[in-house]
Amino acid sequence: MSVLTRDEAQTRSRLLDVHHYAIDLDLTRGDETFDSRTVIRFSVRGDTAGTDTFVEVKPAELRAVTLDGQPLDPAALDENRLALKNLAPGEHELRVDAAMRYSRTGEGMHRFTDPSDGETYVYTQLFLDDVQRIYAAFDQPDLKAVFDVAVTAPDGWTVLANGVTEHTGDGHWKAATTPPISTYLVAVAAGPWHSVRTEHRGLPFGIHCRRSLAPHLDADADELLDVTRACFDRYHEKFDEPYPFDSYDQAFVPEFNAGAMENPGLVTFRDEFVFRSAVTDTQRQTRAMVIAHEMAHMWFGDLVTLRWWDDIWLNESFAEYMGYQTTAEATRFTDTWTDFGVTRKAWGYDADQRPSTHPVAPENVQDTASALLNFDGISYAKGASALRQLVAWLGEKDFLAGINIHFERHKFANASLADFIDSLAAATDRDVHAWADAWLRTTGVDTLVPSVTGDNGSRTLTVRHTGERPHRIAVGLYDQNPGHEGRLTPRERLDLDVPQADPRPIGKLPALVVLNDGDLSYAKVRFDADSFRTVRESLSGLPDPLTRAVVWNALRDAVRDGELPAATYLEIARAHLPHESDLALVDGVLAFAAGQIADRYATPEQRPAALNTLADLCRDLIRRTEDGDHPGLRLIAVRHRIATAAHPDTIAAWLADGTVPGGPELDPELRWRILTRLAVLGATDEAAIAAELANDPSATGQEGAARCRAALPDAEAKARAWEAMFASDDLSNYLFTATAQGFWQPEQAELVRDYVPRYYREAVALAARRGPAMADAAGRWAFPAHAVDADTLRLGRECLADADPIPALRRKLTDQLDDLARALRVREAHTDRSGRGRPPARGGGPAVPPVGSRRDTPFGL
C-alpha cells in the first residue's frame, strides 16, 4: 500500500477543493464484505488544463468507476490509488462502486459477533489511512467536505452516524448532512444496540452498547450522562463557539484499539468502559476523563482540524489537558491531576527518554505511516504537561482568550502550530513564539535539583537546571510536625522561575524541599540529602496527594536512571503505601513495583524477595480495609495480591470459596485474574479453564480463557498459543492480545526460551501480513519483555538492522529494546556478581557524597 506523503498532500490541496461526499453502505451482503458506493463532488482550481491527481480506495473488489459520467478502468487501481488524469479546471463528479472487507483488527469497518448471544455489530475506525477501507476519498485532513451517509442494515439493527439518523424503511437509514469535516472523522456504528437516550440543551444525547452489556450500561447510565452534561456545560462556559454538531452520541463498541475516538456527533469508546465487574473510583474517574477528553475534540480536532499530521498535538495534547482540567472542574472527580501525575505523566517521561522521542510538535512528519507512530506519551502526556505549564506562565484568562480567537479564525477549517501560536499572541503581550520554540520544538526531559546552603538561621535555595526550557514552578517547603511523628506541615510554597536568577532566602532549614510542587511543569526533580532522608521517613505524612505524586515520580525516575536501588524503592513503598489514601497513587506505585521492579529490574535471584515484599504490602492493605470503609483500596490490594502470589494456596482457596475472606465476592474479572495466576503457577488445568468459560461465555470470558491457556506451563499449551498468534490470522486483535499476555511469564523463562529468537522473525512476518494495528499488538504485548539479557537485546538489534519491519513494528521494537537495555543497566548498577542486590549504603539509602562534590544528592545526575 502507498502511504500519503506530506508533499503529495500539499500538492493535492493546492489543486482541489472537495465539496461533498455521498456515501451509501450496504451491510447486508454477508459476513466478509459490504458494499460501498461513493459520489464525490470536487473542483479543480486554476485555468491550466490537464491536471493529474488521485483518489484512494482499498477494496476487496473495485466494480466500477466513472468520472463526469465517463467510465474509468477499475484495473488501473495501483495498490490503493486510482489516478485521475487530465482534469480540466472547474467542477467534477467521481463515482466509485466497490466491495470492501470487514476487519477483525479494529481498522476500517470492524465486525464482531458477541459470543454471549450471537448478535453482530459493526463500527468504523477511520484514522489515517483506514478511511480507504470504507469509502473512496481524497484522504487527507485539510480537504474537508460535507458528508451525506446512507446505510442499509439487517432488520432489527440501529444505525448511528455523525448526525441524527432516520430509518426510512426496509433497513434503509439516512444520516443528517454534516458540516464540513475531515475524511477520517466520518463514523458509522450499526447493530442491535441497547440505547439510553435523553436531551440536553435542545440536543439529542445517547449512550449505546451491545445488548449483552445492557444491564451494566443501565446501572451506570445516570453517572455517564451526568458527566456528559456537566462537561458539555463547562465547555460552553470556556468556549465562545457553541457545540458545532446536531447531536451527541457515545457508543461503547467491542474490540476497540484505542481508548476512544472523537468522531463528531458519534464518539466511540472501548466497551470495557461499561463496567461489568467491580471497579475503583479511580477507574470511574478515568472514564469520566475520557468522556471529557473526547468532548474537547469536538472543538480541538473536529471544528478546527490539523492541516497535516505533524500537528496531532493540536488535537491530542489539548484534549488531554482539557479532559483532566474539565473533569476536575465540572464533576465529582476533583483529583484528576494526581492520577495524571502518577500514570499518564510517567508515560510521557518514559517515551521522551527513548531514541524514538520527538518534539511535541515535530517539523517533519513525512508521511502517514510516520504520523501514526507519534500517537504516544509525548503527543498526549508531555503535550498536556506543556499546556499546563503554558497556563501557569500565561494565565488561564489569556490562554482561553487565545483559544477562542483560534476557534473564530479557523472554525470548520484547518490550522497549524503557527496559526495557533498567532492566536495566542493576539491575546497576550508575552512572547509565546519563544515559548513554543522552547517547549514544542525540543525533545528530552529537563532535570531540576535543589541546593540548600547557608547557616541554620538564613538558608538559601538554589535550583540547578539541566536542560534548556524555562520553567515556572512552585517549591514546597515542609517541616516536621512536632506533635505528630511522621507528619509534615507545609511551611511555604514559593513561586520560582527556572533558570533561577538569584538564590532564594528560605529561613531555617526545612525538613523537605519539593521542587515542582503541584506538578505544574514537566521535568524530573531530585532531592537534597536532608530531603531524601525525610522522604524515606515521612513520605506518607505529606498532606497533599499531588505532592506525594511528585515525590513518587521522582523516586520512580531515580530507579529507572539507576540512581536509586530498586530494593530501596520497595522499602519505601513497604513503609508508606499501607498509609496511602489516594487510589491512583496506590495502584500506580504497585503497578511499577510489580511490573517493572519485580518482573524486569530484579534479577531471577532477587525476584522472590521482591514478590514477597509486595505480597506483604498487599496483605497490610487488605488488613487495613477489613472494616469495609475503603472498598476501592481493598479491591486494588486484592488485585495486586493475586498478581504477586508466589504460591497458589491462598488465591486457590479464594477461587474455591468464591470470595476473599471479608470481601469482596469474586466477580468474573477477579475470577479470571486468579485463574490466570494459577495457570502461571501450574496450579490449574484445561478442565478448570473450560469450566470457567462455560460460566462466563462472554467476549471478556473468551479473552480470559485465551490468556489462561497461553499461561499454562506446558510445552503443548505454549505451542498451541504460538501457532494461534503467529501461524494463523484467525485471532481478532483482542484475542491476540490476551494470548500474548498469557504467553511470556518470568516464572516460565526456561520453558519459553526457544521462542525468544523465533519472536523477531515471526513478528516481522505477522506485521507485514496483518498491518499496523496487529504490528502494534505484536510489538507491545507479544514482545518477550521478561527476557532481560544480552542475547534478547542482540537479537532485537539484529532484527531492526536486517529484517526491515514495517514502521509500526519498528517503532515498538525500538522502544522495547531501549527499555530492555535500561533494565540491564539498572540491574548492573545495583547487583553484585553473584546476582544479589548490593547492600544499600548508610542505613539503607544510597550513598551521599560530601557536599560540594558533583553528585551532591542521593540520586545524582
Image (tube, grey):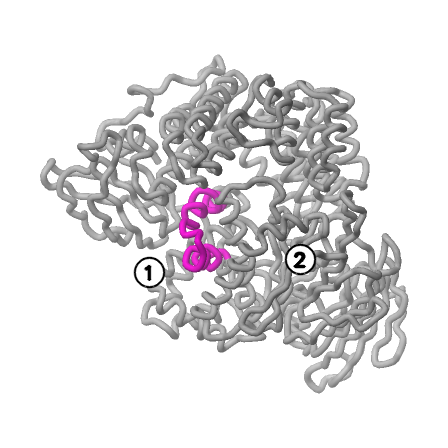
Q: Which residue is denoted by mark 2 in the rendering?
A: 208
Instruction: Tell me, yes or no, whether the two marked residues, 2 and 1, touch with CB atoms within 8 Å.
Output: no
Q: Quadrant of residue 77?
A: bottom right
Q: Residue at x 64, y 20 (%)?
A: 681
Question: Residue 593 location, x and y as percent?
Answer: 47, 30
The answer to whether residue 306 is seen in the rendering is no
Question: Residue 743 location, x and y as percent?
Answer: 68, 29
Above/below status of 648 relative to 327 = above
Q: Main secondary structure of the magenta part?
A: helix
Q: Measure how far apart labels 2 and 1 are at the Cα level.
A: 41 Å
Q: Residue at x 43, y 36 (%)?
A: 629
Q: Amino acid at mark 1?
A: Trp
Q: Is residue 306 left or right of residue 567?
A: right
Above/below status of 643 relative to 391 = above
Question: Residue 71 location, x and y as percent?
Answer: 90, 75
Q: Which residue is denoted by mark 1 in the rendering?
A: 393
Q: Is residue 1 magenta?
A: no
Magenta stretch?
A: 320-349
Please, what secondary structure does the residue beneath circle 2 have?
Answer: strand
